[in-house]
Image (cartoon, rainbow, N blue to C red):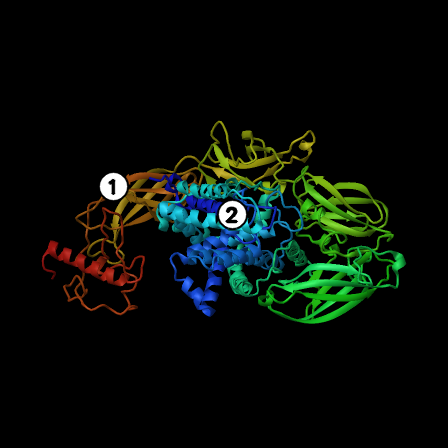
Amino acid sequence: MREWSVFRGALRGSAVLVVAFLAMVSGLPATGGEAFGHGPGAHLREADRTLELLMEVDAEWAALAESELARSYLRLGSIAPDFQWISGALTFGHAKSLSYHLVDVSEELEPRFRLFALGHLAHILSDANAEMFLTPTVFGTVPMGLLNIFEGQEDLQAESETLCEGFGDMLFGDWVGVVDLIYDFYLEGEEAVARAEEILLWYCAEGASFHGRVTDCDRVLADILGALGTADSILPPNRRDGETAIMALVGGSARSVLNVFAGGFLGFLLGTDTTPSRIHERELERVRRSPLGERRFWTELYEEHFLDLAPRWTVDHLRTRSTAWPDWEPRGIIAGNIQSMMGFVEEYDVVPGLLVDEIVWRDAAGDRVTGLERADAGRTFEVSVRLYSTMPWTGTIRAVVRGDREGLSRAEDPVVGEASFALEIDPMEYTERPRDVLRVPFTVEPDGVLGFYLELSVDGGSGPFFTTSVDRFWGIAELDLDEPIYRDNLRTYGGFPESLPVVDAMPGTGILSVKVLTGPAGFGLPGVEVRVDEWIGETGAGGHVVVDRLAPGPVRVEADGGDLVEPLEETVAVESGEHRWLVLRAARRPSVSGPAGWRSDARCASFTWNASDFGGVHEGVQARLVSPDGATVWAEEELGPTVRRICGDGDIPDGSEVVVSVRPMFPGPDGGRYSVMGTSPSWFVDSSPPEVVSSSASWTWSGAACGAPEALSVTLELEEPHAPLEAGLWRVVGARDVRDVQVTWSREGVGWSGVLSIPAPSPDRVPRFEVGARNAAGLEGWAEVAVPEWAEGEDCPAGDPVSSGADVQESDPEPGTPGTDGLVEEDVGADVEAGGAGCGCVAARGGSSGGWMAGLLWGLLLWRRRRRGRGPHP
């Protein structure tokens, strides 16, 4: 009997393990390194869609789809290329030529082999769809910039693909189908394992033969089955339970799915590096607050534009046997990230999915050039740009070459060449249609410019949708541009997308970026006014400002305002042609929140503070429980960086006003200069419940004192010297249910008085009652009240429709009939039955849909009880 101890816990917790396991057996990577394309869920969906398209046009494939476990073999093939990431002995997988070989050799075999081969080809095209089409479109749509959630991918590709193939796949992929694969090829007994052994050994042998590589297929099989073997302790024996487990997780909110994607457990099982970056939590929060944190964004974009793309390519590839593009290239992802940063700049107008993946600068002879000299003035050159679209697009593109003058503005950059191109693009045709190449001639005018860059815009747009200049990016206030992923990668000259430098240009000014930093190495401080000589600006979310066209020499920098504890100033020298960064390290006052109002805990308090804004570099905090003026200290201790609760040795006196103060502690001998105390709003302590001094009770009627009483009225006297009273309370002695009653309290000194009302019980079951009050600290004081003997009023006057013995109308009154709406039985606990209104009338109390019927029947019951107890009514 298999053990599945992990699954015995909470279903949602188990589902985390299920996702991690499925990611492992399907080869889903964690971060960085080579390109991996889609996650397993999307591979399955697109393989299924491929078969559906083939069934519509090919009777042979329609017949194959009816064979035993057809979808299972197709789906296994659709994740098979990623098995090379599981077994080090498997050195192949991602090649269209291998897919075609598998398709050819399987024609004379059983249907399962052909379906597996089709799935393999679908995977290759699905990867291209994910990497070159979906991922750059996602980031071109959302102003996000470069994500750095994990360590290991700090280039211009950033973690865009990782987010799409992992987090996105968990939102729109078929993860129930992935679970089913594990049962079909491992968990459902020896027959399931035999299926896996047969098809995987065939795949390994054919791949090794095709590539001419010596491959230990027994080891490959053992590695893959070993990965599948972890299912014994992760997935439950029952398939339906496994499907439920995965849906409990990937079917939840996008926020909960993101937490699983970003957690370290996934990397632990995968054996890959998912070490959180220094800005891990801040990056996740950026995702949560953007459209990327919404399930609807992912599912609508994928299903409307990308679900059919790779399947249609796959059908075409079966016919054409093309080995050309679409295929993986990193520059499409980089282009999407460039557009993601352009989205922050108002003068740009990004067209998501309209992408550039190659730029080449050439001389008149057609030879590639990487730089110009001032001596080239007057010569003609050309830039060619290769462009594609991830979605159908028709329009005219205007390509412009500009001279790059000093400074970050493009307003004075001269246009030296331009051309327009009318295009009609359908990405479904890329199997046989090449990408578009636009060529723009220009004449070199090198005086006063640093080089030349390219901009692309569309007719009717308000600005460029693509640029090779990053100058405008340095003014994006929302991004922390001092992070290495920006400072080490953003450049106009050198690297994709290429601009053309004038190598002997002689710049006469420099650029200065100023960042105001929290503590010795924390995050930037927003809202700080920065002066650079006569220039004045304010830091944005990234904590920085940028000043261009500074004359060489020293400049005075001052910073003040925002959360700064004291002004900062420094003098720095700027050189011609230099982009210099100045970091001002500042003491920042923490923002602290503690309890509010009145609290009954006289010894401990939980608190929160904005630790994430301090960059996670503090070693902990010094925390105190003190009076607002700091004169009285009840607790003081040093806490670890994740501890959010402080306790004293003794009780804080009742009635005391308390605050919690927090001071971050930074490492190093200089850390103390950045440690500033932040204080929470105050709250009050009351650990003693109110005391019931006296109570008296009497029966009451709502009108004339006739018939059964309506309620028991209790007058309460209490003492509560500190927290104000809020609710009156009553309960049946021995019962657990407590009923809150709104009471108008009167106060004189420490004394409180008020009247609460308890619905009258039936005369033959009058219970014992306890009454009391709850104060603002949540503490309750109770005492039993003496219940007077049951008393009924005088006989009701003649003409009363119930107590006079008149016939009761049997038909239901129409809703809305006066005197009937809202009548309900008053529930007073397990041992109490509700009483009727005086004068034989049923009181309308509370109200609910259909309550008038319950009230009418209850009134009739009470009338009959009175008739039985008192004889004929006169």
> Against 661, is 532 above or below?
below
Give 27 or 659, whichever is nearer the viewer.
27
Question: Is 91 left or right of 385, judged from the image as shown?
Answer: left
N-term-proximal mark, 2 vs 1 = 2
Asked whether the viewer can see residue 174, the reply is: no
- Tell me residue 5's x, y (percent): 38, 39
Residue 131: quadrant of the picture: bottom right
Residue 422, horizontal then vertical, whole percent: 69, 72
Numbered label attached to residue 786:
1
Choose mark 2 or mark 1, whichever is in front. 2
Using a 10 Å C-alpha cutoff, classify the residue at mark 1 as few (fewer than 14 neighbours), some (14 to 19) or many (20 or more): some
Question: Farthest residue toward the right?
Answer: 375
Indicate the position of residue 472 as horizontal and vertical percent values. Answer: 73, 56
* Foreground pick, 340 / 397: 397
Query: Helix, strand or loop at disc 1?
Result: loop
Residue linked to disc 2: 83
Determine the residue located farthest toward the left in the rendered image. 871
Can the viewer see residue 132?
yes
For the N terminus, the image quarter is top left
Q: Residues within 10 Å of mark 2 (few under 14, many from 20)?
A: many
Q: How far apart in space, not on screen, are marks 2 and 1 (Cα)?
A: 79 Å
**In front here: 129 or 250?**
129
Identity of the amino acid at label 2?
Phe
Identify residue type, mark 1: Ala
